[in-house]
Amino acid sequence: MFDNLKKKLKGILGKAKETVEEPKIEPLPVEEQKPSESLPEISDSQEQIEKELLAEVEEELKKEAPPSIIEPPTKAEEEIQEKVEEALQQPVEEKKPPVAEEKSFADKIKGAILDRFEEKIEPEEELEEEFEKIAEQEKEAEEVKEKIVGKFEEVVEEPKAEDFKEEVPPFNPLQEEKFEEAPKLEEVPPKIDIEDEEPIEEKAETVSIEIEKPAVIEEVRKPKKPEHRPKEAVVHLEEEIAEKKEGGILKLFSKITHKELAEKDVAPVLWELEIALLENDVAKEVAEKIIFEVKEALLSKKVKRGTVEEIIKAALKKSVTELLGKESPDLLKLVEKKKEKPFVILFFGFNGTGKTMTIGKFAKMLRDNGYTVVMAAGDTFRAAAIEQLEVHATNLKVPIIKQKKGADSAAVIFDSIKYAKAHNIDVVLADTAGRSHTNTNLMDELRKIVRVAKPDFKVFVGDSLTGNDAAEQAKLFSDAVGIDGSVLTKVDTDPKGGACLSVAYMTKQPILYLGNGQKYEDLIDFSSKWFLDKVF
Ligand SMILES: Nc1nc2c(ncn2[C@@H]2O[C@H](COP(=O)(O)OP(=O)(O)OP(=O)(O)O)[C@@H](O)[C@H]2O)c(=O)[nH]1
Ligand SMILES: [Mg+2]
């Protein structure tokens, strides 16, 4: 029962979130990115913190760099450096491994020069010969030097610009002044003569020491790259943003959590909803009314994200409740309230919709509730209709008033009322022949019955399987004789269920009961709540 409609609505509601709502985080509209509200000030804060971080890095660098490096060279130092540079130009084939790698560059230079002082001084002629050799090898030494410089550049270029930020100029150890800074003044002998120069072999060793220089300098000068921004800084930044931009954040939050839907956002889901309603026997007029109301609900206010499904559901429920109209009256109470017995209920509708069967169900329900009933065999038109009702009367052990086939239906019903009055029976259940609006005679007959019997309650019986037709029929009967309420039968075989809405809307009268089977007890006391619970 109602399985189709239920399934369809469930599917649509399930999809509504995806189809109606956009991704959760939408970019702020340009006009809302005012300087006072968010982004620029946030950048300022970041910049400030980055500056602080850089200052810290610089401070660390200063600490790590030996003070000698930044001292200006003195004359004595310059002299030493000259010697060192001469030594640099010596051939490198005979270079030896570094003397003591753990020593600083300045120590190594100083040590090498002091060693030379301790060596035995060679005669001048020998020295000249050696210098000639040096001159011959000068070219080769130059090449070696270039290689060293090349290495230098590679090593020095390694630190990335962003590691130092813009304020810290990248260190260039190739600058002359940096070379001159290396040795320490106090620890170097004040005078150095050319005669003091060591033999070629020894100079080669000096070159070897010099080769180590780049690595040592790099070690000293290369700032430690901050691998991660300190956690505290990040936390601080977030707090700052949160504090300063409270208004902006709240706005942003509102943007994220709420969305003002436009027609184009809701159109697809409304279209699907309308199709589902039409496919499930909801009359076009009724479906359009529902869609209009759901649309109003979605477009009327800012919709909180993630609640579209709920909003559609709520709008559907509201709309359906309104469509179903006033709540079904409690028939038993109406019977009870009537001062003068009997309470007359007239059943009518198209052929084969279940009028006679429904009379049997009502009889049982009333009897079960302590009311006495009499059946009126008002269908004098169709063959076997009287016998059919008789079967129910026998089964339920209730009296039946009947005449022959072809008798005046209004007269049979009038007789039943007289019988009820005479026997103090609470309720008369009057059957009628099935008819359509095209059958003028039968419609006139029905008018006559109503005029004569003056029923207390006129019940339209519709077959829910006929869907929209049931609603059309109901409208015709309503126009002809008026309807106080409807019964929709065979809902047990109807997976759609839309006829309920259509019939109620067309007749502007409530659905009283639903017939959901062929047994007497298969009668559902209808209410909008029951319907909504079933469908949603
Ligand atoms: N499954 C099911 N069948 C029903 C229901 N109500 C009635 N029927 C069946 O529908 C058929 C027609 O029922 P009737 O009570 O004879 O219908 P009617 O409106 O009196 O028919 P006419 O007098 O010929 O106009 C019978 O076979 C019933 O058993 C119902 O709620 N569910
Ligand atoms: Mg019948």
Image (cartoon, grey):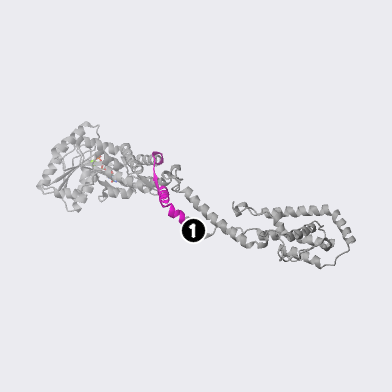
Magenta span contains residue 227: no
Q: Amino acid at mark 1?
A: Val
| Left or right placement of residue 140 versus residue 403 in this view | right
Q: Which residue is mark 1?
A: 235
Count up the numbered dots.
Answer: 1
**Where on the image, by quarter, is ligand 1?**
top left
Residue 50 position within the rendered picture, expressed as x and y whole percent measured from the top left:
54, 54
Magenta span contains residue 248: yes
Q: Looking at the picture, tell me which residue is in the foreground, 449 or 200.
A: 200
Q: Looking at the picture, tell me which residue is in the foreground, 249 or 14.
A: 249
Q: Residue, x 27% and y 43% (percent of image)?
A: 322
Neighbor class of circle 1 (other Cα within 10 Å; few <14, some 14-19, many 20+) is: few
Up-down: is 536 above or below 271?
A: below
Q: Looking at the picture, tell me which residue is in the foreground, 389 or 230.
A: 230
Q: Point out the residue furthest to the right here.
A: 125
| Left or right placement of residue 299 versus residue 90 in this view | left
Residue 189 position within the rendered picture, expressed as x and y whole percent measured from the top left:
76, 65
Q: Residue, x 38% and y 45% (percent of image)?
A: 8
In this rendering, does residue 408 appear at all? no
Residue 321 position within the rendered picture, expressed as x and y whole percent measured from the top left:
28, 45
Label 1: which secondary element? helix
| Magenta highlight range | 239-265
Q: Looking at the picture, tell me which residue is in the foreground, 265 or 364.
A: 265
Q: Residue 125's image quarter? A: bottom right
Specify the principal SS of the magenta part: helix
Q: Point out the residue furthest to the left here.
A: 422
